[in-house]
Amino acid sequence: MQNLGIKFPYMIAPMVGISHVAFRELVRSYTPSPIEALRFTEMLSTRKLPSEKLDLTPQLRVSEGERFFIPQLLGNEEKFIGPSVKKLLPLSPWGFDINMGCPQTHILRHNWGVRLMGDSAYAAEVVRMVKRHTNIPVSVKLRGGADKDIDKNYLLDFTAALEDAGVDWLTIHARPRAAKHEGPANWDIVGEVAQARKIPVIANGDIQTSADAIKIVRDYNCAGAMIAKAATARPWIFWQIAEDLGLNGAPPGREGERAPRTPEEEGREFHRSFLTLIDLVEQYFGTGDGVEEYGMQKLRFYAALAAKWFLFGHSFWRVTTKAKTFQQMREGVAHYSETYTQEMYARI
Ligand SMILES: Cc1cc2nc3c(=O)[nH]c(=O)nc-3n(C[C@H](O)[C@H](O)[C@H](O)COP(=O)(O)O)c2cc1C
């Protein structure tokens, strides 16, 4: 197992509708300085990217000086991949990732996403396509299985083909395609693949707590851990991990404080973090007629995912669906947090 070339190998996953600049900044605001942790963008279609404008497309927005982000590319044709990489390079990403795990039907129709796992030679060629256009690290995010089950031998062969093609590192979502994003993840298989590969392998799937993330790196040969859904409920998870690893530092403005830990502390912090997220969404996606609804949709979607970790999560989500403006949402959330204590489950 090689090291990823970054001191803190814990990262936030690509999630459509979630991993936008406002969420990445929320996570960053909870990351103890001087730690820098990788944060993926949501998947970006290479068919669309060449004709999109960096400053006008919300999914392509980055924060001032943002360097530790990884755009995730969706595609399989060099005539689109080349110009897409060229367009994004001026933003100074830390690396590029290629999506080989998305199970959605419209993605499969184009032979993108997890469909690429069906043809290792072609998948390897897609890696070469991206590598031909950049010198920064190129990774692939794939699944434990391209169909109903996890097939260890296939996974070993497939990842060997990507390694031979020059991919710099891999993330394995330890669920087969049929499981989508739910249910138990098979960390053992990721550990076995990690042991067989020379390049770093990152584990993803059902990593919900700091203890999960640390365990997967310590006990499963993995070079790092990637967190997806749980980071919406617990955007301060890097703060907890850093503390548990005995690293010094606190998030900006939180010097001298400990990371939230108890169900009540985490519940209270969630309200606070959601109010910060509303501010960030307003800052990055704007306000006003017709514009505000885009950000409101992002916030409602986020609340729906995070709500699963809370005893009264459904009622919280309802509050976000009733609001029509950012201001109404702020007031609704503030009122809700005065009325209900939101206890957070460690795992769901
Ligand atoms: C709403 C949502 C959107 C997602 N979008 C992407 C995506 O754009 N690209 C990708 O590779 N995976 C995507 N995923 C999968 C996650 O990155 C991750 O692999 C999966 O949720 C498992 O991790 P978890 O158990 O920590 O949630 C998405 C998952 C969710 C829930």
Image: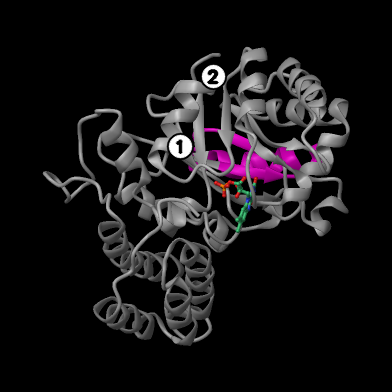
Q: Which residues are magenta?
A: 71-99
Q: Nearest the camera: 138 or 334?
A: 334
- Give the quarter of the image for residue 7: top left
Q: Is residue 105 visible?
A: yes
Residue type at mark 1: give it: Asp
Circle 2: element type:
loop
Q: Which residue is mark 1?
A: 212
Q: Residue at x 80, y 37 (%)?
A: 78
Q: Position of residue 331 (x, y in %)?
A: 31, 83
Query: Could you tell whether 177 is left or right of 322 in the image?
Result: right
- Amino acid marked by disc 2: Asn
Alpha carbon separation for disc pair 1 and 2:
14 Å
Magenta segment includes 81:
yes
**Relative to 112, residue 283 above or below:** below
Q: Is residue 330 above or below residue 12?
A: below
Estimate the x, y position of residue 40 in percent, counting from the top left. 53, 44
On residue 221, the disc is 2
Q: Do tag 1 and tag 2 residues touch (Cβ < 8 Å)?
A: no
Density class for disc 2 (Cα within 10 Å; few <14, some 14-19, many ≥20) is many
Expressed as whole percent of the image width and height from the top left, the position of residue 146 reads: 81, 39
